[in-house]
Amino acid sequence: MLLALAASGYAVVVSVVGARAGRAALVVSARNAAILAFPLLTLASLMLLIGLMTQRYDIAYVWQTTNPSTPDFYRFTALWGSQQGSLLFWCWIMSGFAAAALVLNWKAYRRLMPYVIAYTMATLAFFVGLTFFLENPFERHWIVGTEVVKAAIQPVGGRVPTPTEIGVFSESARGLNPLLRHFGMIIHPPMLYLGFTGMVIPFAFAMAALASGDLSTNWIKATRGWKLIAWLFLSLGLILGGRWAYDVLGWGGYWGWDPVENAAFLPWLIGTAFIHSVMIQEKRGMLKVWNMFLVIFTFSAVIFGTFATRSGLVESVHSFAQSSIGAPMFFFWAAVTLVSVALILYRWHRGELKDETHKTGLLSRETLFVLNNVIFIALTVAIFWGSFGAPITSELFMGTNITLGAEYFNAVTAPLFIAMYILMGVAPLSAWGAMSVGRLGRALLVPLGLTLLTLAALFITGTTSLAALFGYGVVLLAGYVAVYETVRGALARQRTAGEPFLRALLAIFGRNRRRYGGFVVHLGITVIGIGVIGSTLFQVETQQTLRPGESLTIGDYALRFDGMVNGAIAEDGRVMVIANTTVLRSGNEIATIRPRHDIFPARRQEDMNTMMIAGAHSTLENDFYVLLVGWTPDTATFKVYINPLVNLVWWGGLVLILGTLISVAPQQTLPSRVRARVMAEAPA
């Protein structure tokens, strides 16, 4: 870790000196040092992992996150299970992204590379320094006289614990937080870290463009794949976090507007705005200043979210304990944001960020994309205020602790999400430069007709809520537009190339992955939207205490309590209290489910943990979701939810991921003759 800190610090200084002095050898040296940080941090992470797997309880982090009964799988994932290890893991991923970007982009963007090195390595050096000096995962237990002292370096008069003493440490080892013993939460943090650290690369290239004066679209071309990869991992992390909350937290939902959830959502929102907005600069040479601000504030949101999660600023089931890293992280966040904004203003004042095109129609794609950006920024501001702004302001200036709950977020964000889906439906049908009302209306006829037909079918089959029908209509329009534009593109290809429709469909995805992969992403967001509307507006719940053989009724379902299993012991030592139940629908048995409580015994009462694990019968139509909320020797109390369409949230997430992977994949090249014919007939 110390060598990685030295290498990254060296790379920052030498890259800037080399760029300013025009000495290519110094820049190459800085690049080599930057790349070297990755194997050094790989070695550090591997050493900590070996300590976890071999039960080295003299290492304080191993003692904190595992115990002798921890299965090997959870020992491995304990690498990122608490503050110190997760910071090292964060540094390792960041160094990997930086090394990959330097290797892959070195030849094509040599003018930008010195400053890319400087910005990536400055960020890495900060986090490695934070880990090394304040949250070191290699602190060990040393014996000093009759006391046990925790320190990274052997203290004066200290000695290494004997195997017998390490055995004593193992008896009091705490083990991994039971809330983290879920596949979704095990994968959720690495996905978020990949998304967060991946955002460093677009930020570094943007800052390199500002620092070097190369304000062409080179920095955009260099970061096209990186920003999508980071966005993909961030999306996957958010979806997995929702699934974990749904399975483990026992409240029947998947998104509770928790401040730490929102801290990860904020960079996703700004990053999504940036992905859309940067296309305008590529196509029309517009929004240069705006795009710089978007990429800066995406990275700023990443750093702020990390600060909020790890500093103790907010209390949450997702957050780490309060620690000493809060102040340095806050000042780093403030410094990065201020310096970046100052660079933009400097280039703007010099007239180097002027747009190449100024005139655009009211219904043009540029205008609609700008409106789309406004919606995303408004969502970011509203969520930031509710999560952090209002609570911090009230505590600082009024001495009270105000917490804005789900009511605030639902009321404020719902209109903005509606506007977002409307723009998702309209913007892809507009043209660059100008678009008439009549032409846009004609383009909307087919998707709008399909939307109205679907709403009519929903109404006939029993969906009579006006709010639900309106919400479904807005969301469906966006999905039908994505499908319609894809089919139009395939038909154009079919006419020009004379191919069967399916082959033409595959061909357009190969030739224009960004456009049609984007439509698949829009389709995924449509599916998620339908799932959110159904599970929010039509969720029903009940709670009842039953004796064995008794049933409760909810809708056309019934839940029969068949009996209890009290005191079952799992392989990892946890004690389980299990309710055996049978689900019936219209009098027919359809499933057997076993909601339970997992009790993790500990030698100290304060370390004992209990988890309430739901039982669920899942179909595409709904989830029958059951919680065991209490029990006596003779009874059990159940809370039951019916969550309509909730599984579309997860399926939509998979579609979104597929679309992003398509967009990131390398583009195929058409022969010039075929390309000219396809472009002539393809939709705008």
Image (cartoon, rainbow, N blue to C red):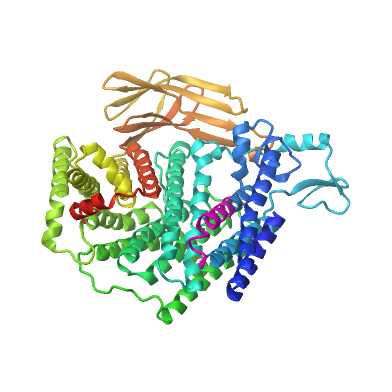
Query: In the figure, is residue 350 to the left or right of 319?
Result: left
Mark yes or no: residue 530 visible: no
As drawn, 289 above or below 55: below
Instruction: Please give the name of the residue rendered at 39% of the width and 44% of the height, measured from the top-left corner.
Output: 657
Q: Position of residue 666 (x, y in %)?
A: 40, 48
Query: In the figure, is residue 148 to the left or right of 462?
Result: right
Q: Position of residue 551 (x, y in %)?
A: 35, 22
Looking at the rendering, in which quadrant would you find the C terminus?
A: bottom left
Q: Position of residue 279 (x, y in %)?
A: 33, 61
9 inside magenta stretch: no
Mark yes or no: residue 191 visible: yes
Q: Quadrant of residue 491?
A: top left
Q: Position of residue 579 (x, y in %)?
A: 47, 24
Q: Start and end of the magenta stretch?
A: 93-112
105 inside magenta stretch: yes
As drawn, 651 above or below 617: below
As drawn, 150 above or below 205: above
Instruction: Please give the name of the residue rendered at 36% of the width and 76% of the height, measured from the top-left corner.
Output: 354
Instruction: Please give the name of the residue rendered at 31% of the width and 48% of the height, measured from the top-left corner.
Output: 511
